[in-house]
C-alpha cells in the first residue's frame, strides 16, 4: 500500500515533466518524521502530519535546486536520497522512540465480504486515505486548470511558456505535491504498517514506485496495477518461507526489483510518457 501513495505523487510530478528521483529519500524521511512526531506528541495523527510535512520539505529542496536554480535534477535527487539515508540512520541511533500506532478500523458490513473484505475494509486508519488520495490525484491532473497546465508543461514547455504559464513554478508545485504523497507513504509504512522505524526501512520502495508509474504508462489505473504487481512480489518474498517453500533468500529479496527491471524492459516501447520528462527548462533558451 505505501507504494500506491508514493506512485500517485510521482505520477503528478512526472505529468509536469519532472522525474523526482528524491522520492525515495522523501519517503524515508517521512517514515522517520512520523515516528519522531508520534513519539514526541503521543499522537499518531500528529506523527502522520509530521511525516507528510517532512516529505514535502525534501521535495521542496529538490524543486528549488532543480527547477529554480536549474541544478541537474538527477544529481540533486541522488544527493537527497543519500542525505536522507545517512541523516535518518544517524538520528535513529542517537535517539530513542516510542511511537504511537493508529488503531485498526473496520467498516461493517463491507469488512465481512469474503476474501477481500478484511483486506480492503479492516485496516489501520491511514490505509483508508487511499480511497481519497487516488481520486484526488486523478481530479487534480484531469479536472483542474492547474493539472491541465502541468500536463502542458510536461508535453511542450515552450508553448506553455508562450501562453503565460510559469513552467518551472508548475514543476516545483508538482514535485512538492509528489513529496507530500511520498511523506504520507513513508508515514504509513512506519506508524501505520510496521509500528516503528529502522534504517533504510523503505529499501528502494520509492524507486519501485517510479517503476510502477512507468509500468502503468503514466495513467492512474496503470500505476495502481504496477503497485499491485510489485507489492505482490514483495509480499510473496515474505510469505514463501512462512509456507515452508525454500528458495534462495537473496533471490527472494531481489525479486521485486528484478520484476521492476523486467517490466521496464517489456514496456519500453509504450511511448506514452510526457514528452519532456526529465528535461529541464530555461526560458532564456527559447
Image (spheres, helix red, strand yellow):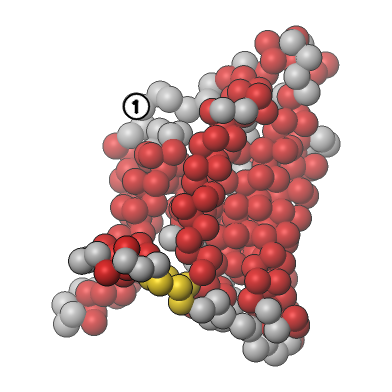
Vertical comparison of 280 with 77: above or below? above
Quadrant of the image occupied by residue 173: top right
Quadrant containing the N terminus is bottom left
Read off the residue under disc 1.
Answer: 269
The C terminus lies in which quarter of the figure? top right
Where is residue 67, by image quadrant? top right
User: Which residue occupies the extreme front position in the image?
Assistant: 109
Q: Name the one closer to the observer, 238 or 66.
A: 238
As helix, strand or loop, the secondary structure at mark 1 comes to loop
Image coordinates of residue 137 in percent, x first then y, are: 55, 41
**Residue at x-position 59% and y-position 55%:** 182
Q: Is residue 113 above or below residue 278?
A: below
Residue 20 seen in render? yes
Residue at x-position 43% and y-position 34%: 219
Q: Nearer the viewer, residue 238 or 141?
A: 141
Direction from residue 252 to residue 47 in the image, left or right: right
The percent coordinates of residue 85 (x first, y second) are: 64, 67
Residue at x 32%, y 63% (from the top left corner): 110
The quarter holding residue 186 reads bottom right
Task: Count the numbered circles shown.
Answer: 1
Q: Residues within 10 Å of mark 1 (few under 14, many from 20)?
A: few
Residue lying at 71% horizontally and 54% vertically, measured from the top left: 56
Q: Locate residue 75, reporting x and y percent.
A: 68, 45
Where is residue 220 shown, x and y percent of the image? 44, 38
Above or below: residue 29 compared with residue 3: below
Q: Is residue 92 visible?
A: no
Amino acid at each position: 500500500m505505501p507504494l500506491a501513495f508514493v506512485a500517485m505523487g510521482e505520477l503528478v510530478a512526472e505529468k509536469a515533466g519532472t522525474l523526482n528521483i528524491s522520492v525515495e529519500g522523501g519517503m524515508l524521511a517521512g517514515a522517520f518524521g512520523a515516528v519522531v512526531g508520534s513519539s514526541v506528541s503521543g499522537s499518531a495523527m500528529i506523527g502522520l502530519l509530521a511525516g507528510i510535512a517532512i516529505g514535502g520539505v525534501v521535495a521542496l529542496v529538490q524543486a528549488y535546486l532543480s527547477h529554480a536554480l536549474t541544478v541537474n535534477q538527477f544529481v540533486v535527487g541522488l544527493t537527497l536520497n543519500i542525505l536522507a539515508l545517512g541523516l535518518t540512520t544517524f538520528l535513529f541511533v542517537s535517539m530513542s522512540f516510542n511511537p504511537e500506532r493508529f488503531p485498526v478500523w473496520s467498516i461493517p458490513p463491507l469488512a465481512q465480504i469474503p476474501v477481500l473484505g478484511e483486506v480492503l475494509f479492516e485496516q489501520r486508519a491511514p490505509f483508508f486515505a487511499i480511497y481519497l488520495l487516488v481520486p484526488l490525484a486523478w481530479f487534480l491532473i484531469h479536472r483542474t486548470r492547474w493539472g491541465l497546465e502541468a500536463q502542458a508543461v510536461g508535453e511542450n514547455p515552450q508553448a506553455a511558456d508562450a501562453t503565460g504559464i510559469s513552467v518551472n513554478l508548475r514543476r516545483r508545485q508538482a514535485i512538492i505535491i509528489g513529496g507530500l504523497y511520498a511523506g504520507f507513504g513513508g508515514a504509513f509504512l512506519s506508524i501505520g504498517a510496521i509500528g516503528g522505524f529502522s534504517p533504510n526501512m523503505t529499501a528502494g520502495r520509492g524507486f519501485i514506485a517510479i517503476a510502477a508509474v512507468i509500468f502503468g504508462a503514466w495513467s492512474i489505473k496503470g500505476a495502481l496495477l504496477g503497485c499491485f504487481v510489485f507489492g505482490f512480489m514483495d509480499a510473496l518474498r515474505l510469505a514463501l518461507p512462512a509456507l515452508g517453500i525454500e528458495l534462495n533468500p537473496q533471490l527472494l529479496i531481489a525479486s521485486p526489483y528484478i520484476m521492476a527491471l523486467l517490466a521496464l524492459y517489456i514496456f519500453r516501447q509504450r511511448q506514452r510518457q510526457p514528452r519532456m520528462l526529465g528535461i529541464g527548462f530555461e526560458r532564456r533558451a527559447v
